[in-house]
Each structure stands twice: as structure tokens, then as C-alpha cells.
Image: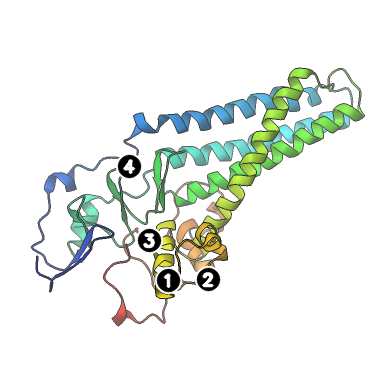
């Protein structure tokens, strides 16, 4: 392939080309595997997640809410009932989001996409086929994913254009659920000291199980709060994690400084302002992921705007200087 018709980017293993004679392998285009194909290797993290939810559910229901609902005091029974309703409602949203994360295709590049847009796309050397702008090849799933953010072992799936919203909601609901569990367990302990009733009295088994649950809840809150905050920041910038790291690397190199700066490396919100060509403004960027209808923002089914291939650009962008690829 001549240099006049293509540009090779070794770091990303792609070729950007306008040459219609670029060879494609029909088998690679037509045999489209689901992204969640590595089930055997990715089962353990899923089992851990399911076990944590099951353990928390069992402990919270039988050792926190149920004893309160058996109390002779109406006020304590009301606290137990309200805590149970809030917990079960939020748990339903959390598990629904988890199922969408695991089973929803994140945006695999299909044969229809390739037929519609042809070879005027970035070219993946690994798949040996074109791929849409902002897509990346996942080595775990062995597929190119539209607007890929990262591969998450806890859901055994990629996080991309179609399931980014479900992933953010799952992490958000899990963090909120952990806060609620910790708060109501503290209330359960206080009630056991204030009201000395047989049904609300704490026994050794109660202390052990509720203590473990409290510890897990606090750990989940600490880990997910920072993680989710950083990802929402990227959503408001219309930037994926992969795009952030690449833009940061290029920015640091242009400034002649180390790329290992701790603050900007681990917390995007503390990094210097970096220009991003797809930044449409915070509200429009948010709608790109969550959709136009606010009524559907709390539900995990996909409502992202567009098709995962064409991306709107700011009106003031100089289109003459638009690069061939942003992957």
C-alpha cells in the first residue's frame, strides 16, 4: 500500500485509507462473534459480583429489616418497612443495569456498518477490516467495539457505545445501594441499643454478619465514588477512557513533561484542560450517552444518540483540519 493512499499508525495498529482496493477477509467480516464470548475465562469475576449481592441481600433482609418489622413498636416497624422498600427498589434497578451490562452488545462492528461506509474508515490490522471512527479493537473480545471505553472483567464485557449508560447506572446504583445499606444497618444498631426488645436485640451472629456487610458497603462506596465521578466527568467531556489517556499522553508530550504525574494520571478531573474535538458542551455531551428524553435516563436500556459511526462536531471546528482518525 502506497504512502499516498494510507497512513499507518503503529501505536494503534490501524491503517487509515481511502483506497477502495484495500483487501478484506470475508470470513472476518461475516463471522461476527458476540462480545461476551470469553465466558470461561471471565466467569470468576461474575461469580464474585453475584455472591456479594446475594450475601448482602440475605444479611440485610434477615438480620436488619426483618427484625425491625417484627417489633412491637409501630415506629420501628415503619422504619423496617421503609428500609425494605427502598432497598428492594434500588436493588431491582441495580440488578437490571447489571444484566444489561453483561448481556447487551456494547457496539460490535457489523457487516452492515462496513457495507454502509466502505473503506473510508480507519482500518484495523488485527481484524483485517475497516472500523468506525472512535472504535477500538478489544484483545479480550477479539472484536472492534464502537466508542470503546474499556473492557470490564466484572461484567465480562466491553463498555462501549451501546452499554456505557447501563454501566454508569450500574456503578451509580451500586454505590447508592451500598450507602443505603450502611445507613440502615447503623440505624438498626442504634435501635437495638435504644429499644431493648427481644426482636430487635443484636446477637453475636447479627454483629458478625452485619459487621461484614458494613465493611463491604464502605469499601464499595470508597472505590466506586471516585471511579464513577471520573467517568461522569468524561461523559460531560464526550470522551472515553481510551481517548482521555491518548489525549493526555499527547498533551504531556507537547508540554515536554512526564506522563506519570500522579494527580492527572489517576483523576481526570484534576488534569489540565485538554481540547477534545467531539466536545459539544456538557449537556449535549451527556445526551450523547443518555439520550434526549430525561424520563429514560434512570433506566439502563440503550438510548444513546446516533449510530456509533457518525459523530457530531462543534460548529466552530475547522473541518479542513479534521484528522482522518480519532481511534
Q: Is 149 situated left or right of 111 in this image? A: right
Kindly check if marks 2 and 4 are in contact, taking CB atoms under 8 A apart as contact: no
Any part of residue 316 in sight: yes
**Of pointers 1 and 4, the one earlier in the residue sequence:** 4
Give how far apart the Cα atoms at labels 1 and 3 are: 29 Å
Which mark lies nearer to you, 1 or 4?
1
Give how far apart the Cα atoms at labels 1 and 2 are: 9 Å
Name the colour scheme. rainbow
Q: Which residue is mark 2?
A: 272
Indicate which disc residue 251 carries.
Answer: 1
* 324 shown above or below 300: below
**Of pointers 3 and 4, the one earlier in the residue sequence:** 4
Q: Which residue is mark 3?
A: 306
* 12 shown above or below 188: below
What element does badge 4 sit on? loop
Indicate which disc residue 27 carries.
Answer: none
What element does badge 2 sit on? loop
Taking depth in this image into account, of 42 and 173 the one nearest to the observer is 42
**Of pointers 2 and 4, the one earlier in the residue sequence:** 4
**Of pointers 1 and 3, the one earlier in the residue sequence:** 1
**Whole-percent x, y for residue 179 in the image:** 69, 42
Q: Which residue is mark 4?
A: 140
Amino acid at each position: 500500500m502506497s504512502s499516498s493512499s494510507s497512513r499507518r499508525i503503529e501505536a494503534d495498529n490501524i491503517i487509515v485509507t481511502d483506497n477502495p482496493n484495500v483487501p478484506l477477509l470475508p470470513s472476518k467480516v461475516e463471522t461476527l462473534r458476540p462480545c461476551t464470548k470469553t465466558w470461561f475465562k471471565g466467569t470468576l469475576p461474575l461469580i464474585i459480583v453475584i455472591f456479594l449481592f446475594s450475601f448482602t441481600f440475605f444479611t440485610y433482609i434477615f438480620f436488619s429489616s426483618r427484625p425491625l418489622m417484627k417489633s412491637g413498636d409501630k415506629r420501628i416497624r415503619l422504619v423496617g418497612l421503609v428500609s425494605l422498600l427502598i432497598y428492594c427498589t434500588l436493588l431491582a434497578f441495580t440488578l437490571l443495569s447489571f444484566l444489561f451490562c453483561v448481556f447487551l452488545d456494547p457496539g460490535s462492528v457489523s457487516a452492515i456498518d462496513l457495507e454502509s461506509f466502505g473503506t473510508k474508515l480507519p482500518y484495523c490490522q488485527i481484524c483485517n477490516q475497516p472500523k468506525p471512527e472512535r472504535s477500538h479493537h478489544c484483545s479480550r473480545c477479539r472484536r472492534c467495539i464502537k466508542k470503546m471505553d474499556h473492557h470490564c472483567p466484572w461484567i465480562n464485557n466491553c463498555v462501549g457505545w451501546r452499554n456505557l449508560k447501563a454501566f454508569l447506572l450500574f456503578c451509580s446504583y451500586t454505590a447508592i445501594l451500598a450507602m443505603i445499606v450502611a445507613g440502615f444497618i447503623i440505624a438498626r444498631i442504634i435501635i437495638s441499643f435504644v429499644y431493648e426488645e427481644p426482636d430487635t436485640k443484636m446477637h453475636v451472629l447479627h454483629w458478625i454478619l452485619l459487621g461484614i456487610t458494613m465493611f463491604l458497603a464502605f469499601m464499595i462506596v470508597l472505590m466506586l465514588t471516585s471511579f464513577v465521578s471520573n467517568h461522569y466527568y468524561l461523559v460531560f467531556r464526550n470522551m472515553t477512557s481510551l481517548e482521555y489517556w491518548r489525549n493526555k499522553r499527547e498533551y504531556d508530550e507537547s508540554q515536554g513533561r512526564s506522563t506519570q504525574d500522579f494527580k492527572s494520571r489517576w483523576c481526570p478531573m484534576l488534569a489540565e484542560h485538554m481540547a477534545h474535538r467531539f466536545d459539544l458542551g456538557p449537556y449535549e455531551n451527556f445526551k450523547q450517552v443518555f439520550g434526549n428524553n430525561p424520563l429514560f435516563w434512570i433506566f439502563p436500556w440503550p438510548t444513546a444518540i446516533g449510530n456509533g459511526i457518525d459523530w457530531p462536531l462543534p460548529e466552530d471546528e475547522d473541518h479542513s483540519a479534521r484528522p482522518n482518525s480519532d481511534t
